[in-house]
Amino acid sequence: MNGAGNRVGAALIAITRRGIVAAVSLAEQWPKARVFALRTRADGMEHPRVTWIEPPLSGHIAAILAHHDPVIFFAALGATVRLIAPHLQNKQEDPAVLSVDEGHRFVLPVVSGHQGGANRWAEQVAGMLGGQAIITTASDAMGLLPVDILGREWGFQVEGDKATLTRMAGHMVAGVPLALVQESGSREWRKGYDPFPGHVVTLERWEEADPNQFRGLLWISRAAVSRQMRSVWEGRMVVYRPPVGQGEAVAVGMGCDRGTSVATVEAALAQVLTSHFLDENDIKVLASIDVKQDEAALLALGRRLHPKMIFYSAQELADVAVPHPSATVLRHVGTPSVAEAAAIRAAGGSMADLVVEKWCYQGDDGKNVTLAIARLAAETVERSGQGMGALFLVGLGPGDHGQMTQRARQVLQEVDCIVGYKTYIKLLGALTHGKEIVGSAMRQELDRCMEACRRAASGQKVALVSSGDVGVYGMAGPTMEILFASGLLARMTVEIVPGITALVSAASRLGAPLTHDFAAISLSDLLTPWAVIETRLEAAAAGDFVTALYNPKSGKRTTQIERAREIFLRFREGTTPVALVTSAYREGESILLTDLERMTQHPIGMQTTVLIGNRSTFIRDGWMVTPRGYGGKYDLDAKVRAAVEGEG
């Protein structure tokens, strides 16, 4: 395209975020009409598909209107109206239709300007073409709130009969006093109407709306319409239901009996959320009293939901004014309220911010749970997001990206910072792009753990990485010890992301050496006395376990692998199969099959996993196998012969 055509194409490409867009051009310089059909990326089309239409164009209009929304005519308004008029149904069904003059100076919504969104599209197209949108719908032209489609772009569902909607829309245009109350859902929609018309007054709670002062109520909430509310506002109220989990931010205050089960806590939360049209994704903070810092059910809930967790002292909660103080609670824990006070304090607000006041629940275990929910103010949400850290202990597997779990890759994309041993960081390659990297040398494990904990406590999302599985000779253990000792656990969420450990990745290269019982023993005596390691080696050898030896040998530690071999030779034949797998799934991978007698004659290092078979393990055709015992229980040879003969 040249000249004006290029501008049209650029504009259309830019507005393909919604549905299917069609533009029809009748410019005189083009001998045929052409349709630019654009689809979203999800439909597999990133660029316009141009279709030349043979005249008469009128024969194609029905199909264009049926399959595209919006439809933009680059033609005179009169020509556009004559073309579409025979095919219009009603404003609920017709697509948005716009007309753009040949000079691209004016963009006019033709039909479905209000409900169909043509007015909004006109503003967008005009902005892209450097033109002016001509809006004639009364409420939109006057900058008023669209009563019938309020918040639609944010997923709000409108509840109200046609007569009430018409009446309330008339009040909006006429400028009569209306009250607007938003108790849930995203508030981003407000930016498009800021400042609100003077006759629309925003309130925090519907109870604050004086029915004698206001002619109508616009109520944005997930709560059920109460009998009292209906009796006061029937026929002059429009209800808007935001989708769950959308832009909401609440703090949940919770108290419970000592030893309450996880099931009871979960059931209590589910009940209160369902009853008030809330969603778990809305929960940004979970708060309670400090005597509940070790309550297993609350901690389990926090691990699952990943909110910021705060535990307040009794005095901190006692200073908060609440609607339902309790002398019994005061006598037991030193504050007249736990749930309500914790929710209000965590939200940084007052009683007016309570979405759910004191809510009591008794579970099947006979234990009691008390909850309250408060809405977080915008500035509190920001502070909460900054203060709420997340620590992910991530197992990277053997090092090859293809052997990394999907969850591990997802976490590495989401975090702000990655902490780990420099060699492991290097293995991540492009997965570290855009992340803050904190690498350290070997034997600085505690430093890495402490640094990761410190950063998470300050509000960052941090991944502390280990090769293999983070819980098998990895960083999970020392990190949890540091969190317990430092008291930082309450200031962050913690998730342990498993990975393929060395003995599993090594076994996958060998065949099936771990089909029966096995043991894993580290030969490193830096943290474990050698006498203890020898005791474990003797037990594994005597018990006929297939045994995986981690950290078998280093530059300075060379005798332990020899001693391990001597111990096993006391219980097993020298011909017992042994596999030496070095750097499985990494560059420089080495797989060597040998036996117990000769195993130390081959290169063994820190990256080697040694697998010593049991008395039944055998090597055949380059594969190492430990039978499970099926051959003894079933006539395996007979089954194989039958299968082979059946094929013949």
Image: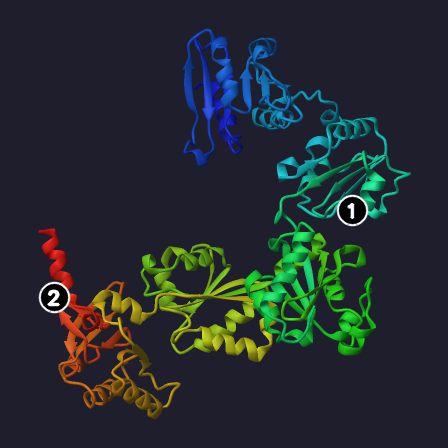
Mark 1–mark 2 Cα distance, whole angstroms, equals 76 Å
Q: Which mark is residue 621?
A: 2
Nearer the observer, 448 or 206: 206
Nearer the observer, 450 or 209: 209
The amino acid type, in three-letter code, at marker 2 is Asp
Earlier residue among tags 1 and 2: 1
Q: How crowded is mark 2: few (under 14 residues within 10 Å), some or many (20 or more)?
A: few
Instruction: Give the residue pinned by disc 1.
Output: 226
For residue 387, above or below residue 217 = below
Task: Decide if residue 306 is on the left or right side of residue 206.
Answer: left
Pointers 1 and 2 in contact (C-beta within 8 Å): no
Q: In which quarter of the image is residue 421?
A: bottom left
Q: Residue 146 carries which label?
A: none
Task: Decide if residue 166 is on the left or right side of residue 297.
Answer: right
Residue 270 can be seen in this image = yes
Residue at position x 38%, y 69% in the image = 469
For residue 104, above or below residue 17 = above
In percent of width and height, residue 315 lies at 78, 74
The image quadrant where one finds the N terminus is top left
Residue at position x 22%, y 79% in the image = 614
In percent of width and height, residue 415 lies at 50, 59
